[in-house]
Image (spheres, rainbow, N blue to C red):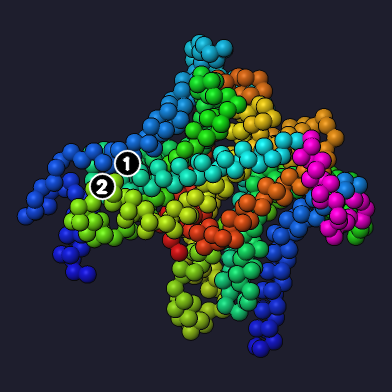
Amino acid sequence: MQAKREFNKLLLYIIALIGVTISVFPFYWMFTASTLKDSQIFKVPPTLVPGGNFMDNLMNLAGSWPLWRALINSLAVSGITTVTTIFFSALAGYAFAKYRFKGRDSLFFSVLLIMMVPTQVMLVPMFIIMMNFNWMDTYFALIIPYLVTPFGVFLMRQQMLAFPDDLIEAAKIDGCRDFGIFFRIVLPVMKPACAALGIVTFMQQWGNFIWPLVVVSSKEMYTLPLMLSMMVQPGQVVQYGQVMVSAAIGLIPMLILFLFFQKHFVSGVFGGSVKG
Amino acid sequence: MSSVEQEKQTNLAYPNTPVKGKKKFSLLNLSPYIFIAPYFLLFIVFMLYPLIYSFVLSFGNWRAGVTTFVGLENYRMLLTDPMFWKSLGTTGIILIVQVPVMLILATVIATVINSESLKFKGLIRLGFFLPALIDLVTYALVFSLLFNETYGMINQGLKAVGLDGIKWFSDGTWAKVLIIIAVTWRWTGYNSIIILSGLQSVPKDLYESASIDGANRITSFFKITVPMLKPVLLFCTILSTIGTLQLFAEPFVLTGGGPRDETMTVIHYLYSKAFGSFDFGLASAGAYVVTTIIAILSYFQIRLSKGGEI
């Protein structure tokens, strides 16, 4: 019995070890490859320890591709849309959760419905709209359509339902108006929900690929994922060391975000759809 | 809290609701409308209008800004295009193989993390969740390097143990396997964390009384854990189905849809129709067909698992 329990425990650790190795290895290798010369990356047998070529790769990358510009573009687009999504979603979510007004339920139902429509359906008409607005290849095209998302409104509404009503009432007695209550009472209390939504939004925007691919044409407007995909387009010599540097740089903000907001990550990812 | 208090509080939440024995609030309060206005403005311009526009486009032929009505021609063209069916088939194969494999793996991982005798839980969970942080283009690139047919680490490893290297990119079937491996790597940890939250909500006394009744661990896994996980697994299945049907970045970056369009997914097909040959009408028709398929699949998944709530 004792031996069997020990065996089970061992099995558990073996599964965990193998699984974590498979999960983490590509990351390790990405960072390693970013410090190697291309000839070392493609060596037989493979090089598994970091080399000293990171700065060279970085300089060459910054010399031939708009690395810093793409990094700033990605940060700007993701940052702005994250802030606005949190704010507008919280506003709408608060109204849906704590007010009773004509058309509330059908309007909220439309939020749920549009969440289920795949974004690809809107790709072509959105492209045409961008052309008509003369927004092709501009920040407007990258930012404006993502200022707020139905998912954000849904998530915030779910979180706001649990907001204690006596707080709102007390503020009302103290003479606080609707907007004041939202800014001074609701928003500060909802910080964890805002953090969760912010993380999900930032992550989605940071990795957004198909939309920039469709609306961006000039190098100055590249976002990081778009630049990465352009670096490996067929018909050119792919500099893998540089590609891996750029991939590693793109990952760093996500890692930082995760380390600081680990708790909110999990609650944001599930969007209140699973209770647990 | 007494039920009277409860009722009072609920009513206070809705200032416009007349409450018995209380002063009526003004019926027209504009605040909620102002609060939802920014969202609905964007909703109308960038979601509702495109949705309708796309529907109109699917019955028309778009040329230089002018749409001429062509009836069901786009749908006929789409449904008679062998490439459409091929891409749909490819997506279907990836879906049928990848989603069950991933969910089984994710359930095993969640069970392992949830087990009481395991130490370093936080670290192990972090390890499994890490792939969920990486963006689609980046991991597709890393995988294209790892699985490179001549120099990639995977094939070198296979050769080192005396096997032949696998034609990950030049053989259609293996290229699909590669996409499946990549997608599974990216999403298994994510799903296992969702399943873990489901596992943790299973009451512990259920297992205790089962073991008193003489059930072993495997029996209680299938008789207690799996049924209790049904809602969570259903949630994961639906999310993964929708995600897989929309698969685009991975095949686009990893294989470019090749070899010989063997890994072209249906969204990749629609993308190339829309922005390669600028056939907006056909692409819109296709987008509606795919949406319909997603809706039908989701509906049946919910129906098939009667009693499962999401």
Q: Please, is residue A23 above or below residue B86 in the view?
A: below
Q: Is B162 positioned to the left or the right of B174 in the image?
A: right
Q: Please, is residue B50 above or below residue A75 in the view?
A: above
Asked whether the beta carbons under mark 2 and mark 1 sit within 8 Å of each other, the answer is yes
Q: Which residue is mark 1?
A: B35
Over which residues does the magenta segment extend? A40-64
Mark 2 vs mark 1, CA separation in Å: 10 Å
Q: Split into 4 quadrants, where in the image is the C terminus of chain B?
A: bottom left
Q: Which sits in the foreground, B131 or B234?
A: B131
Q: Which sits in the foreground, A221 or B10?
A: A221
Q: Is B94 positioned to the left or the right of A135 in the image?
A: right
Residue B291 seen in this snapshot? no
Q: Which sits in the foreground, B108 or B125?
A: B125
The local secondary structure at tag 1 comes to helix
Q: Is B97 positioned to the left or the right of B17 in the image?
A: right
Q: Which sits in the foreground, B104 or B160?
A: B160
Q: Split into 4 quadrants, where in the image is the N terminus of chain B?
A: bottom left
Q: Which residue is mark 2?
A: A178
Q: Residue A25 at what x, y percent from top left?
A: 75, 59
Q: Residue B64 at what x, y percent from top left?
A: 57, 12
Q: Chain of mark 2?
A: A
Q: Image point 52% across, 11% down: which residue? A: B66
Q: Image point 34% across, 36% down: which residue? A: B37
Q: Chain of mark 1?
A: B
Q: Residue A273 at what x, y percent from top left?
A: 44, 54
The local secondary structure at tag 2 comes to helix
Q: Image point 51% across, 19% down: which residue? A: A132
Which kind of residue does numbered mark 1 sit on?
Phe
Q: Pointer 1: residues within 10 angstroms few (<14), some, or many (20+)?
A: many
Which kind of residue does numbered mark 2 sit on?
Asp
Q: Residue B281 at what x, y percent from top left?
A: 55, 20
